[in-house]
Amino acid sequence: MEQRKGIWLAVAAFSFWGFIPVFWKALDSVPALELLSHRIVWSVPLLFLIIVGRKHLGVLRDSYQTPGTVATALTGGVLLSINWGVFVWAITTSHIVEASLGYFINPLVSVALGVIVLREHLSTVQRVAVGIAVVGVTGMTILSGVLPWISLVLAFSFGTYGLLKKRHAAAPPIEGLFMESTFVAVPALVYLGVLAGNGDGALGTSMTTTLLLIAAGAVTIFPLVLFGAAAKRIPLSTLGILQYIAPILQLLLGVVVYGEAVSSGEWFGFVLVWIALAVYTIDNARILKAANRSEAAADRG
């Protein structure tokens, strides 16, 4: 039951991320570093209100008093800042297709970390599925003719962040997000303060821009809370494959809605990733069904 709940939480998180370029495109007149700073700063009070509402201040206090948890959160904050900043820059400068490639590669990083670091098991069919995806993403990269630095930074920063969420020292999802955000909020506030002092900040320039900047906190937090909850319930390898939902939606947005060009090599990888996702999903459903039958038989016995 918990694993099934984790799968649905992951699907919701990645679907939200898939459509998130629409939000950031509405703010493409604001520099990426300023957008990143607003994402961080507006996340902090909202997360604190959630923690207070859940009466988890004690949990938060204990997390801050645990060195391993603090170190994990600090590292997570840095990784998230890198990921958020590069992603926002890519979206607002019309590189949605390249950003989607990063999240095609990202699940492969998650699967590799799950198998190598956490010793998670993949069935033979699942290994074949991952192999198909590797061929697709590798072919996509080679045929593009250039080093996809945007894609690689996004993939490795978020893949490593997912691994951190699997650590026993990691704080609970919401408390962990609060800690991660507070650690990077200070430099973000300083930067925004400098902009405001020079009269260069976007906040207050128009009602629409101001409301969207404030909403950046909620838009940032919601899918991350879902992701953190999912990561606690399902294997990292499964989480990695489900992450293909976001780049598929982002690629479609980039091509259909915003008219970005896609090379034949990128389409080659896109099709193979779809095949890999189908193979993995079908086999994972088979394994879950068999596990449920065994569990039911054990209960009857």
Image (spheres, grey):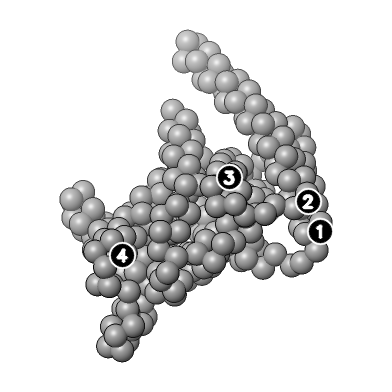
What label sits on residue 265 in the rendered view? Answer: 2
Q: Is residue 115 left or right of residue 203?
A: right
Q: Looking at the figure, which quarter contains the N terminus?
A: top left
Image coordinates of residue 216 in percent, x first then y, are 34, 60
Give the labeled residue for mark 3: 256
Please give the label number shown on residue 289. none
Q: Front-most of 62 and 17?
A: 17
**Mark 2: few, some, or many residues within 10 Å (few <14, many ≥20)?**
some
Instruction: Point out residue 93 in the picture as x, y percentages from the top left corner.
Output: 54, 66
Q: Residues within 10 Å of mark 3 (few under 14, many from 20)?
A: few
Give the residue furthest to the top. 300
Residue 27: horizontal and vertical position, in percent? 40, 63
Res 279 → quadrant = top right
Which comes before the other along the chain, label 2 or label 1?
A: 1
Which label sits in the foreground, 2 or 3?
Answer: 3
Q: Is residue 241 above or below residue 209?
A: above
Depth order, front residue of 77/205: 205
State the residue position of label 1: 142
Q: Can residue 175 be seen in this snapshot? A: no
Which mark, residue 209? 4
Sequence-wise first label, 1 or 3 = 1
- Alpha carbon distance from label 2 to label 3: 18 Å
